[in-house]
Image (tube, helix red, strand yellow):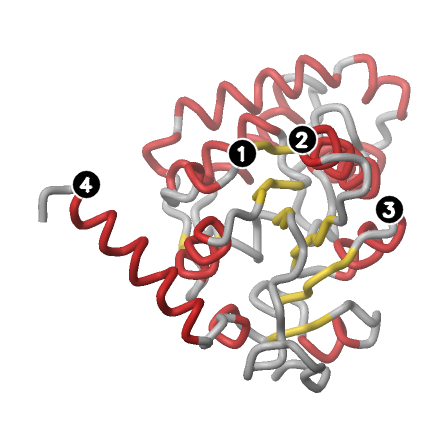
Amino acid sequence: MMTRAPAAGENRNGFAWDSPAYVFDIDGTLLLSRDLVHYNALNRALDHVYGVDTTIDGVAYHGKTDLSILRAALARAGVSGKVFEAKLWQAIDLIGRDVASHAASLHPEVCRGIPDVLALLKARGKLLGIASGNLEAVGWRKLKAADLDGFFEFGCFSDRHESRADIFARAVGEVKSRLGNGTSVCFVGDTPEDIKAAREVNAKIIAVATGTITARELTSLHPDICVTNWVELLDHSADSARCLQEKSHRRSISSGL
């Protein structure tokens, strides 16, 4: 359930899409990855680049960046931060190549309601972006496999940012470079780390309990709004319905149906 009452001017389900830009997390927010492509690539980097016989199993990785996951797994195995950083670009390169070579095995499950939410936002002229803890090569591969990549105009990833807050800050900068310095940004994520990072960059945050974290836990961190799934957040106003219908009609015409 949504965690606050409607305010004046909001639509009947209590939420208004009033930000000019929405920036989404990937895993647990847009899609769920039940294949092992990303997992296996991280583990191969631990073995082939760092020479450590270990895996990321046991690392609390929900909401973490790929860099912080690798660092934690290596630290647990006794590898110093200095060694981690010295070989990091080799690891990033290997992970990207490994995921690309196994791209046919990527089978992400798109969260229910996401295609309609993204179509609605695009129809309203919103700028859509990605802020993810995935490495860039990994994140775009997942989005492409889910047929969601075309909705987004930019992406900010963890290749150069171990901190999620730094990724969010970069996304804010990207939005402002496109829409102006006074532009507000709303992030969308499924973990406490998303909420904390959004607050660090003074941005709005929508929390969705579509990943592994419960709505109760997310709500306790006071996001601007929290929902259990995307269908709750869909706008049912006549204006929104018309936007979606027009977009569907255009899609039918372009496909020759």
Mark before the other along the chain sequence, 4 or 2: 2
Quadrant in the picture for the N terminus: bottom right
Q: Which mark is residue 254?
A: 4
At label 4, which amino acid type do we have? Ser
Q: Above or below — where is 241 with respect to 46?
A: below
> How far across and how far down the image is residue 37, in percent?
47, 37
According to the picture, the residue beneath numbered tag 3 turns out to be 201
Mark before the other along the chain sequence, 4 or 1: 1
Q: Quadrant of residue 236?
A: bottom left
> How far across and how far down the image is residue 115, in percent?
40, 56
Q: Residue at x 76, y 68 (%)?
A: 224
At label 3, which amino acid type do we have? Val
Q: How many marks?
A: 4
Q: Which mark is residue 153?
A: 1
Could you say whether the residue bearing mark 3 is in a helix, strand or loop?
A: loop
Mark before the other along the chain sequence, 2 or 3: 2
At label 1, which amino acid type do we have? Glu
Could you say whether the residue bearing mark 2 is in a helix, strand or loop?
A: helix
